[in-house]
Amino acid sequence: PGCGGDSPRPPVVVITPEPVRGVISQASLSGFQPDVWISIDIPLSQKGTLDITVDWTAPDTWMYVYFGRTRCDYAQLSGRTCPFILSSETKNPKPRVLYTEELEPATYYLVLYNVPRDPRTGIGSDNTEAISIQIGLTVKASGERTTDTIRLGRPTVVPPPGL
């Protein structure tokens, strides 16, 4: 308040909408044997950030988890030349959670490898696993949102050459 009878203005409040996260897919599979690569297509229909949670049964299993834009063949996977966006090659933590940067709509690939036991190094296990996967999508509140459920591609074993 001051001279001239002006009344104070209320403060300006700017409301910024929060990003919105939703679970876009859940899947499970069993019979995942050691020394097998599995690739799962993830068709993403809108721009956003993914969180990918992979869990398995036995706590002593070594599960490697990868995520990328390229469908890789057995030679690329076993030769470690596949250009992944994210990779996690460790025994722990269980469950494994990966977070992406903001992704454009496209088909991406989640690749899992059940690491076989190597008696020389002690890495790996002999466990045949059951896997559960949950994928969350976070979109900016200012962007258009979809309520479409994402259907993951069928998990496929990546066969060695000649099979």
Image: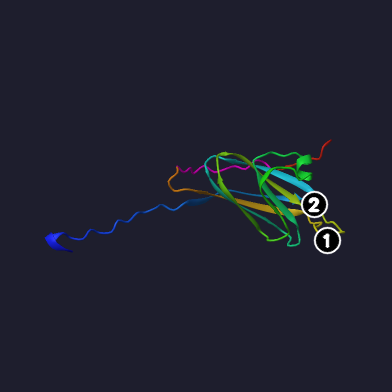
Residue 161 percent across, percent down from the top left: 82, 37
Q: Residue at x 79, y 40 (%)?
A: 75
SS of the residue under disc 2: loop
Q: Which of 143 and 145 is in front in this view?
A: 143
Position of 145 with respect to 10 (left or right) is: right
The quarter of the rendered structure image containing the N terminus is bottom left
Q: Residues within 10 Å of mark 2 (few under 14, many from 20)?
A: many
Q: Which amino acid does label 2 sit on?
A: Pro
Q: Quadrant of residue 41?
A: top right
Point out the tag, 1 or 2, that comes first from the N-terminus: 2
The quarter of the rendered structure image containing the C terminus is top right
Q: Where is mark 1, residue-wise? A: 122
Q: Which of 95 and 76 is in front in this view?
A: 76
Q: Residue at x 59, y 49 (%)?
A: 100
Q: What residue type is labelled 1?
A: Gly
Question: Is residue 62 visible in this depiction of the protein?
Answer: yes
Position of 66 with respect to 119 (left or right) is: left
Q: Is the magenta stretch mostly helix, strand or loop?
A: loop
Q: Residue at x 21, y 61 (%)?
A: 8
Furthest-left residue in this view: 4
Q: Distance between the residues labelled 1 and 2?
A: 14 Å
Is 152 one of the magenta-colored residues? yes
Residue range in magenta is 144-154
Q: Where is mark 2, residue-wise? A: 34
Mark closer to the observer (1, 2): 1
SS of the residue under disc 1: loop
Q: Where 88 sits versus 154, above or below? A: below
